[in-house]
Image (spheres, rainbow, N blue to C red):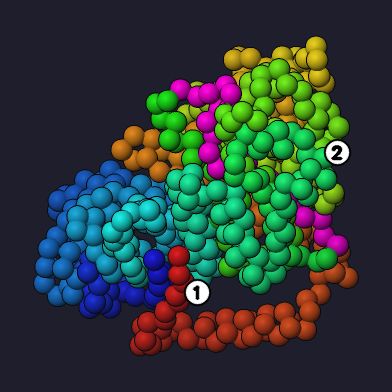
Amino acid sequence: MDFELQDLGGSQASALAVDAWVVLWPDACGPVAAEAPASGPLHDWAQDAVAQHDIGAEVGQCLVAHRLPGVQARRVVLVRTGAQSPAQIRKAVAAAWAALKSPAPARLGLYLGAVTGPALQAAMQALADASYSYTTTLSKPKPRQLQHVVLAVADSLAVQGAFERACATVQGVELAKEWANRPGNHATPTHLATVAQQLGKKNRMAVEVLGPKEVAKLGMGAFLAVAQGSEQPLRFIVLKYQGGAKHDAPVVLVGKGITFDTGGISLKPGPEMDEMKFDMGGAASVLGTFAALAELQPAINVVGLIPACENMPDGRAIKPGDVVTSMSGQTIEILNTDAEGRLILCDALTYAQRFKPRAVIDIATLTGACVIALGSVRAGLFSPEDELAQHLTEAGAAALDPCWRMPLDDEYAEGLKSNFADMGNVGGRPAGAVTAAKFLQKFTQGLNWAHLDIAGVAWKGGQAKGATGRPVALLVQYLLDEAARIQAQAPARDSAPSPKLAAKASARKAHSASSEAKKTDKAAKPAKKRKGAA
C-alpha cells in the first residue's frame, strides 16, 4: 500500500479524485480551523453535521454520506477523534475503515488537517493494520483492496519525519505479519534464512547464516537438542545493520524462531495446535525491525540473532530427563520438551556476548503464563536494568505497542534447581513467565539485558486469527530513541558530520528557510506531495 502526504485544505480535498474520504474531527474545532470559514464542501458538510448534532462526540462515532454535492469522492465518512491523542486517532481510523470496507475503496483520502506527528503515525499504522489481509497460500489470491492513501494535512513539512517513520514501521510490521502468518511448511528455518539474506542486500546490511555443523562447532548444545527431532535443518541467522560509527557498541535483538512447535515428546493438546506456527513471532519481529532499519537508516549499529528450528517428536528428539550442555558450559536438565524456546535463546544470548553490546533484547512467544498474567494488551517486560526497562516502556507507550515490567526477584529461580544438572528448564506452574525469564537471566552475565515475552500479543485467535506484527513498532521506536541518545552522548570530536552529510544538512537548512519564506503565499501554490510505500 502506498501512502502520499499532501498539503490540502477543504476546497482542494473536495476536488481530489479518490474513491472515499475519511474526515477526522476533534472535539474543539474542525481539523482545518486555520482556514477561512467557507473552506469547501467537504469541510462545510462535516462542520455542519457536528454543529447540528448529527454525529455524537464519542471517539469512533461515524457518519457516512454518499455523493455529497461538490465532493469528487463517492463516499465520505466523518469520524470523531476526541482530543486527537494517538490512541484516539487509532480507534477512530479503525472505526472509519469498518464503515467503509464493504466495499473497500482502492484509493482513500484521510483528512487530518493540523495533526501532530505521533497522531499521523497512529493514523497510518491503524489504517495499514485494519486493511491488511494475508493471501500468500490462497489458491486465488486477491490483491489488496486498498492500494493508495492520500494523507491531507495542513503542513506536510512539519510531519515529514513522522510520515517517513510510519511508512517504514508499517513495512516492517507487515513483513513480520507475513512470515508469522505463513504455515509451518511455508516458513521453515531455511525460508527465514532466505528472507534475512534478501534483507542483507540492502544498504548498510550484512547477513550470515550458520547451519548445524557451524552451530555444533560453536558448542550450542541446547539449540541443537531442540532441533534434533526435526527433518528440517536448523539455521542460526546473524543480521547486522551498520548505521553508527564502527567502534559503537551495537544493540542486539534476539528473536525466538521456532517455526513450528508441537511440544516435542511433551506433546501439546491437539486443539489450536495449528497456532504454533506463530511461535516464531519473535524472529518475525526481528526481521520486520531490520526491514524498517533499511528504510530509515538511523545512526546506530544493530545485530539481529535468530535461532530457527522446529520442535518435533521424532525418534531422535530430546526426552524429559535428558541433560544437555549449553554454549555457556552450563548444563540443563530437560524436564519438559515444550519449554524449548528458552533452550534456543540461551545459546543465542551467550553468542551475543561476543559483540560487547550496548544492550541485548530478546523477543519470544515464550510462555502461556504471560498470556494469563497480561492478556493480549501488553507484552511482558523483564529486565534487571532500570534504565533499559524504562526506555523500552517509554518506546512502547509512544508506539502504541505497550509492555509491562514484571518482577525478577532471585527467589523465583529456586524452582529451577536440579539434582542432575546446573538447572532445570522449567520451574513449575506458579509464576511461569517469571521463572522462564529467570532461566534466561542465567545466560546474561555482564549484559545490559531485557526480555520481552510476546506470547499474548504476537497473534490473535478466533475469527480474527492472524499475526499482529508486534512488537516491531516498539523495537523501531526504541532503536530510533537509542540512536538519538547515542548522538547526544557523542563527544564533540565525533559529532562533526562527514562532508557528504554536512552538504545534505546544508541543503535541508536551505530548503527549510525557503519553505518558511513561502508560507505567506502557501495557498496560492500547488499542493506539496510526499510519497512513501508501505
Q: Residue at point 59% right, 48% down?
A: 189
Q: Residue at point 65% right, 38% down?
A: 227
Identified by mark 2, the residue type is Gly
**Residue 487 shows up from this direction:** yes
Q: Position of residue 416 (x, y in %)?
A: 73, 18
Between 194 and 14, which is closer to the camera in this rendering?
Answer: 194
The residue singled out by tag 1 in the image is 157
Q: Where is residue 296 in the image (x, y as percent from the top left)?
A: 60, 66
**Direction front: furthest residue:** 315
- For the magenta stretch, what is the residue range? 247-269
Q: Position of residue 155 (x, y in %)?
A: 44, 72
Of the residues tagged 2 and 1, which is closer to the observer? 2
**Residue 23 shows up from this direction:** no
Describe the element under mark 2 as helix, strand or loop.
loop
Between 7 and 519, which is closer to the camera in this rendering?
Answer: 7
Q: Residue at point 81% right, 55% down?
A: 249
User: Does the residue at mark 2 contact the one at mark 1 (Cβ under 8 Å)?
Assistant: no
Identified by mark 1, the residue type is Leu
Between 31 and 531, which is closer to the camera in this rendering?
Answer: 531
Query: Does residue 268 belong to the magenta stretch?
Result: yes
Between 44 and 450, which is closer to the camera in this rendering?
Answer: 450
Left or right of 310 in this view: 488:
right
Q: Which mark is residue 528?
A: none
The residue singled out by tag 2 in the image is 446
Crowd band around label 1 with a 10 angstrom C-alpha radius: few (<14), some (14–19), many (20+): some
Q: Position of residue 444 (x, y in %)?
A: 80, 36
Q: Residue at point 19% right, 55% down?
A: 102
- Work out which quarter of the rendered image holds the N terminus and state it: bottom left
The CA distance from mark 2 to mark 1 is 44 Å
